Image: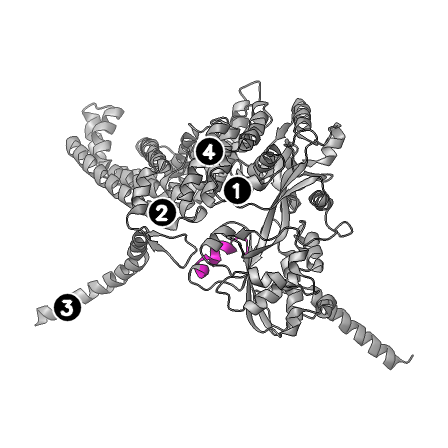
Amino acid sequence: MKTNAKKLKRNLFIASFIIPTFLFFCVFTIYPVIQALQKSFYDWSGMSENSEFIGFDNFVEIFKDPIILRAIGNDYFLVVGKVIGIMILATFFAVALTRFKLRSAGFFRAIFFIPNVISVVVIGVLWNFIYNPQIGFLNAFLSLFTEKKVDITWLGFPQHTIWMLLPPTIWAGIGFYMILMIAAIVNIPASYYEAANIDGAGQWSQFRHITMPLIWEQIKVSVVNIVITTLNGSFVIVQLMTNGGQPDNTTQVMGSYLYRMAFQQYHFGYGAAIGVMILIVSLITTFILQRVMRQEAIEMS
Amino acid sequence: MNMKKWSTIGLATSMALVAAGCGKATPTETTKPAASVAPTAAASAAPTAAAAKKLSGDFEIQYFVGGYGDKWWKAVIADFQAANPDLKIKESAGPKINEQMKPRWIAGNPPDFVYIDGPELFDRQLVTDGQLDDLTDWLKDAKNVDGEKIMDLLAQKPQEFDGKMYNIPFVMSAWGIFYDKALFKDKGWAEPKDFEDFLAVSEKIKGAGINPFIHTGKYPYYINGGVLYPAIVSANNNDYKLLQDMSTNNLEAWKNPAIIKGLNKIVQMRDKGYIDKASVQINHTDSQSLFLQHKDAFIPNGLWLPNEMAKDVPGGFDFGFLPSITQDKGGKVVANTSTSTFAIPKKAKNKDAAKAFMQFVFSKKQASQWAELSGAPSNVKGDISSSKAPNFVKDAAKFLSSPDTVVVPTVSFAADVDKAMQDATLALTIGTITPEQWVTRVTEVVAKQKK
């Protein structure tokens, strides 16, 4: 009897933590997802009280829409670019600031972390100024090395503008992942490196055989996080820097296309269907990524 | 006169001054208590239709605050409040108000009166969604507070949707091309009267190291409204019916060669290097700033531009306004108007007050006050030459009332078609598509709309 009462007390204690969190999660996460799913089966303008049930028509339309295909391509371009750019630079800076005992390491950590405390909106506006062809920093800087004033329209080339979105997003992401890497590296016992030194292993060898395998879990989590945040969060930077996909939809991503269809072209149901697509694409990508990286981890060990 | 009399006169004068002061001061709180505003002479003297029926209850007005500011709204609402002290007026206003009010429209709880302007509130969509009250019958006989028939006063009649009228244009702006008269005078450049002139002066401007033309590539509807549509009308022998047919998704209209001719004007400007390369990536504020800094000589815009940029206009800048620059030699000026309208939501709770307010605002007094306080002409006919409206507004009003001007009634395209045209025009300005491809692309979207 005493054991049962103790068990009940314990369960009530656990429930007092889980139930409010679960309810909160249901109301603010699960319910909107279900609502979006429901809206995706309707033809609804987003302003009307009336909507018409059209089954899977919105999803059929998505597969026929050439802009969606381009948007998915752009999303993956940003995912790959950001994963490569952020992970290489964040790891490089983390190693440099931990393994070489720099006196100014704290200063550099703070400097690299600053973009993470700035709002994405500010980052977008800031980089718009940097890229501005007439009054921007980039052209002014390049003009220092040329006789004629440089007037490159950085965000105006249909085929290349998507590349221009990588520097601001990578720049904004490095600091956070660098801190994660630093946390992982400082947890590696110093004796591992001492032993490697005694065995005559060089810095590169130590990085390859000690640092990388031991921070691999951290890298895995970081990559998955970058993929998810990019697929779901490129909208803001695209909206701010290229007004939702310009020029001529060449920088369109799924998030910005969702916004355009739902709020600018009054196809809310179609926008909801694009939202569901983003969810599906994110889940599939994350699943594949975790499988691939798990195999990689086994090979490394 | 004894001291007592002087004291009485002094006290009365002070009270009158205080009352006048109260009348001028526009209360800033969202909901106005009925008795807080003293009646102004004009408002109380008006033999209003509203006065015949005493208005009471809540009355909510939704208005977007953009380039025209909100000075006129504050003034007119204070006047209307004074004329209807029992009415509890609520202002739902601001630059984001359309977005903020959207959930209420969806839930069937809209305001009582709406000013359709700004993003996320589109008249055609509101009509399609059945959100607006059909004003056709009411408008047939509706008179303003001065007893004049509203329909007779309108310079531009309300747009009809399947033969019915749902919204009445009050703001009569026009798209066109701005330039700085002072700069042109200083450099000895002549104001262009046609496209040939425009190309000639642009060459001189380019020679002087200034970009001839800038637009906002992030919002290509500026170049569509200010250049392309007038060019299409000019190429169609000044007949604007083509634009109207295009807007109703008439596929035959989209085959008209005037569209290609119009697009070719933009191609000419592009190929001669007159379009500032920066245009493609900048927004309206940036393009307007560069124009004000004399880095660019011409900019397509609406009449709200000077008011919108008021804080940044350099001293000595003298706004010149041309409704169109794409007409051939001897051709008529084409003024593509841009109206912002007033409407009553179908589910408005106080329709009596909404209609009375409509009668109140469509008066010559309010129209003149609008021109002065917003810096744009209203849609109410009348001579504003003696008003305090800015010179470029008077110039524009002259153009709009001239027999040599083709005044194009506001045309609104379906949102998908409009967006397709914007994308295609931007692509045309940077040379990634041809005029023929422009037509093909947009026509595909039009065909889809028809289904």
Nearer the camera: disc 1 or disc 3: 1
Question: For the residue marked with disc 2, what is the amino acid?
Answer: Tyr
In which quarter of the view is residue B228 placed? top right
**Which chain is indicated by disc 2?**
A
Nearer the camera: disc 2 or disc 1: 1
* Image quarter (top left, top right, bottom left or bottom right) of the C terminus of chain A: top left
* Residue drawn 66% across the image and 49% down it: B376
State the residue position of label 3. Answer: A8
Q: Could you say where residue A154 lies in the image, as x and y percent from the top left?
A: 48, 29
Tell me, yes or no, whether the highlighted magenta stretch contains residue A286: no
Q: Nearer the viewer, residue B255 or B213?
A: B255
**Disc 3 from disc 4: Cα separation:** 63 Å
**Disc 1 from disc 4: Cα separation:** 28 Å
State the residue position of label 4. Answer: A247
State the residue position of label 2. Answer: A270
**Which chain is indicated by disc 4?**
A
State the residue position of label 1. Answer: B245
Question: For the residue marked with disc 1, what is the amino acid?
Answer: Asp
Question: For the residue marked with disc 3, what is the amino acid?
Answer: Leu
Question: For the residue marked with disc 4, what is the amino acid?
Answer: Pro
* Residue drawn 64% across the image and 57% down it: B151
Q: Nearer the viewer, residue A100 or B204?
A: B204
Task: For residue B276, say whether it is visible.
Answer: no
The answer to whether residue A129 is above or below residue B362 is above
* Image quarter (top left, top right, bottom left or bottom right) of the N terminus of chain A: bottom left
Q: Residues within 10 Å of mark 2 (few under 14, many from 20)?
A: many
Q: Residues within 10 Å of mark 1 (few under 14, many from 20)?
A: some
Q: Nearer the viewer, residue A287 or B297?
A: B297
Q: Secondary structure at mark 4?
A: loop
Q: Name the N-terminal-most of marks 2 and 4.
A: 4
